[in-house]
Amino acid sequence: MINEELTEAQAKARAAEKALIADYQRTFGTEHGQRVFLDLMRMAGVDEICFDATSASNTGYMLGRRSLALRIKKFYEKKTEAETPQPVKTETGS
């Protein structure tokens, strides 16, 4: 019974994640969305160094900002199961 509940909960979580990924891809998949996506990545400093030797709090701020942008990027660029190549099953033998 516990395994069935866990499996059901996992299936719901997977479905929710797939829906969220699809939302990110629809949102940022347009020409306008691409411009916004690139602006968010730039503003979050994804390609910048986040360490500030003079301020631990500033380093933490920059890392948090970058972390959020990377989460957005991960969900936008994530492949769905339909797009992910599945291993080809081959028969072994002589």
Image (cartoon, rainbow, N blue to C red):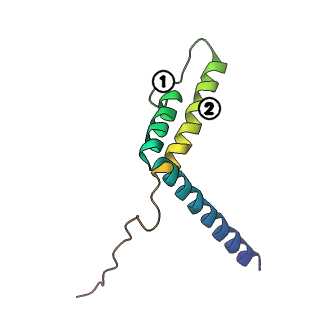
Q: Quadrant of the C terminus?
A: bottom left
What residue do we see at 56% from left, 44% from top?
71
Looking at the image, the residue that sits furthest to the left is 94
- Expressed as whole percent of the image width and height from the top left, the position of residue 45 reads 50, 27
- Expressed as whole percent of the image width and height from the top left, the position of residue 15 reads 61, 66
Work out whether residue 91 or residue 20 is closer to the camera in this orientation and state it. 20
Determine whether the residue tagged by mark 2 lies in a helix, strand or loop.
Answer: helix
What residue do we see at 44% from left, 58% from top?
79
Q: Quadrant of the N terminus?
A: bottom right
**Residue ID for mark 2:** 64
Task: Tell which circle, 1 or 2, labels the residue nearer the N-terminal end.
Answer: 1
Image position of 92 (left or right of 34): left
- Eyeballing the image, is 86 above or below 23? below
Q: Which quadrant of the structure image shows residue 7?
A: bottom right
- Eyeballing the image, is 75 above or below 41? below
Please tell me the numbered disc located at residue 75. none
Looking at the image, the residue that sits furthest to the right is 1
What residue do we see at 58% from left, 25% from top?
62
Work out whether residue 71 or residue 59 is closer to the camera in this orientation and state it. 71
Q: Residues within 10 Å of mark 2 (few under 14, many from 20)?
A: some
Disc 1/disc 2 C-alpha distance (Å) = 13 Å
Looking at the image, the residue that sits furthest to the top is 54
Determine whether the residue tagged by mark 1 lies in a helix, strand or loop.
Answer: loop
Please tell me the numbered disc located at residue 49. 1
- Eyeballing the image, is 30 above or below 81? above
- Expressed as whole percent of the image width and height from the top left, the position of residue 82 reads 43, 68
Q: Are marks 1 and 2 in contact (CB under 8 Å)?
A: no
Amino acid under disc 1: Ile
Total count of labels: 2
